[in-house]
Image (cartoon, rainbow, N blue to C red):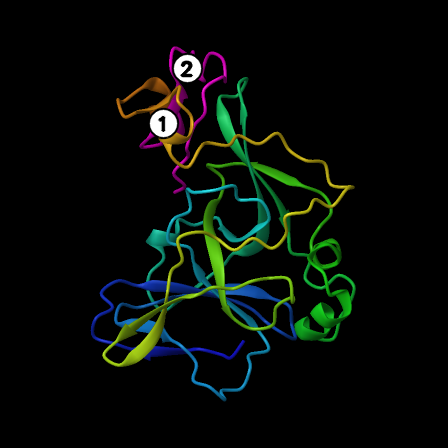
Amino acid sequence: MASPVMTDVSWAKGKCSCYHLCGDSFKFSGFMHPPGRAIKKANTGTPKSSSMVFIPCRNRNRGRPMFSPCALSLKIFKSIRPNNEIVCKLVLMLGLSFNPKSTKFYYHYIEWNDNLYGYPTLAEAMECLKVPMAFIRAMFEHEVSVTCIFNFHVRFLNQVCGPSLPSWTHSPVIAKRNGLYFHEMMSAPDLWSASWVKHIKRPNLIDGPTSPCCISNVVYSKHASELARLTKTKRLIQFKNAKTMDREPIGLIKLITR
């Protein structure tokens, strides 16, 4: 995919973050741009980018985050000031689990291994590995990391340019403003694979329906319950007449990430 350009515009009111996976050093980093900047779509004939470039996903609460690329940071993303680097890790998010003993939620993910097998460039690694299963096995750690959601902050990502595998499909959201085309956030994160690497133990995930109408006995609970305060969520989804999750984790929950 051709490389887009960060451009000064009058209509962009808020700061925006952008993330890069370097095509030759294999290092991942982010940058917080000031208000008044947006990513312009590359014109036809623009040289292809050797690095993968990502922007955050608009809605991080829909669907199953199975093998979704994410930026993982110790800092709250909203607290990072403009014109500053974002120190973060590239991970593939596998999902969430709830531990009733500690009454806490945990992220399950695998980390980028910084080119453990020594491929010359990112594009050459993709050309050699060809399929998502092989790419994930070679470029990410095999051991699943598990950490409390209060230890890290997450941004789900969409790729907007750079090398990619043939089986990955990209449908970027493009908006026309003042005669020019710009990239905008998508409604769901990228999915890099729907297959599981067999020697990675699959965590016990908690999934919530995208809409309460999908299941007849599920309702939204918006009152300030003890569980809402405990998990710092704004909306809960729970089965009718089910016990609360701090006593017995039967109900389903839709977690709004920080």
Left or right relative to 78: residue 177: left
- Label 1 environment density (alpha carbons within 10 Å; few <14, some 14–19, many ≥20): many
What's the residue type where badge 1 is placed?
Leu
Magenta run includes residue 175: no
CB under 8 Å between callouts 1 and 2? Answer: no
242 part of magenta stretch: yes
Measured from the top left, where is residue 14 in percent x and y?
Answer: 26, 62
Q: Residue at x 56, y 73 (%)?
A: 162
Label 1 to label 2: alpha-carbon separation: 10 Å
Tell whether 93 sits left or right of 25. left
Numbered label attached to residue 236: 1
Residue 89 lies, in percent from the top left, at 56, 55
| Left or right: 224 in relation to 128 | left
The residue carrying mark 2 is 244
| Quadrant of the frame with the C terminus | top left
User: Residue 55 or 217: which is nearer the viewer?
Assistant: 217
Q: Residues within 10 Å of mark 2 (few under 14, many from 20)?
A: some
Q: Please tell me whether the stretch drawn in magenta is mainly helix, strand or loop.
A: loop
Q: Write the start and end of the magenta stretch as one range.
A: 230-258
For badge 2, the amino acid type reads: Thr
Say which of 187 and 205 sits in front. 187
Point 65% across, 75% down: residue: 24
**In the picture, which quadrant includes the N terminus?**
bottom right
Q: Secondary structure at mark 2?
A: loop
* Helix, strand or loop status at disc 1: strand
